[in-house]
Amino acid sequence: MAVADAAGFPLSVHVASASPHEVTLVDATLDCSFCDELPQRLIGDKAYDSDELDARLEASQGIEMIAPNRKNRGKTQDGRPLRRYRRRWKIERLFAWMQNFRRIVVRYEFHAENYLAMVQLACIIILLRLIG
């Protein structure tokens, strides 16, 4: 799981097993941030449409969660914050940049710590390419 800024630069990455739902991994991902400041808003897909997650992020860290409504729920957000959802392609672009690193795509590492180190190294290389 990753968090990117408005330009698509990686701010935080976290590696976990595939079995837990992504909503439960949000706090751990924010704790692994590369920078001191947390984002003001998080934009996620429909899986992140949860009242519990919205309340938890707002109360503990002051972060606004923006996610489109799931089909089986009523409207939980008006359309104004959801306009920001159109910018979600920037995190998808970050994942596409990470797919250029074969060691991440194939996942040669058996241990999660080693895989996380490779993902962090890929983030460092991505940042260095964009800066220089």
Image (cartoon, grey):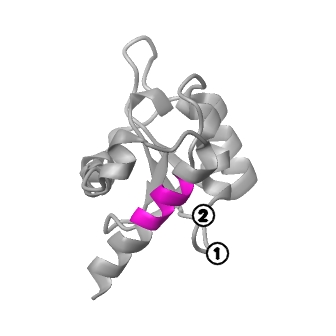
Q: Vertical placement of 1 versus 94: above or below?
A: above
Frontmost residue, 96 versus 3: 96
Please indicate, yes or no, whether residue 76 appears anywhere in the rendered image.
no
Dot 2 amino acid type: Ser
Q: Work out which residue is located at the far bottom of the displayed protein and give it.
A: 132
Which residue matches tag 2? 33
Which residue matches tag 1? 36
Magenta residues (range): 116-122
Disc 1 versus disc 2: distance between alpha carbons?
7 Å
Mark 2, secondary structure of its residue = loop
Please state if 96 lies on the left or on the right of 110 as rendered: left
Q: Is the magenta stretch mostly helix, strand or loop?
A: helix
> Can you give x and y, in whole percent of width and height, for residue 68 in the image?
37, 33
Quick one: quadrant of the C terminus?
bottom left
Which residue lies at the image location 28% right of the left edge and 48% below the top edge? 92
The circle drawn on residue 98 is none
Q: Does the magenta stretch include residue 92?
A: no
Please indicate, yes or no, whether residue 29 appears anywhere in the rendered image.
yes
Frontmost residue, 96 versus 9: 96
Dot 1 amino acid type: Asp
What is the crowding at mark 1: few (fewer than 14 residues within 10 Å), some, or many (at least 20)?
A: few
Q: Work out which residue is located at the far right of the displayed protein and give it.
A: 60
Please state if 47 lies on the left or on the right of 94 as rendered: right
Frontmost residue, 97 versus 5: 97
> Can you give x and y, in whole percent of width and height, for residue 131 in the image?
31, 85
Q: Does the magenta stretch include residue 119?
A: yes
Q: Work out which residue is located at the far top of the displayed protein and give it.
A: 72
Which residue lies at the image location 75% right of the left edge and 52% below the top edge? 60
> Can you give x and y, in whole percent of width and height, for residue 85 in the image?
31, 46
Frontmost residue, 24 versus 51: 24
User: Dots 1 and 2: beta carbons under 8 Å?
Assistant: yes
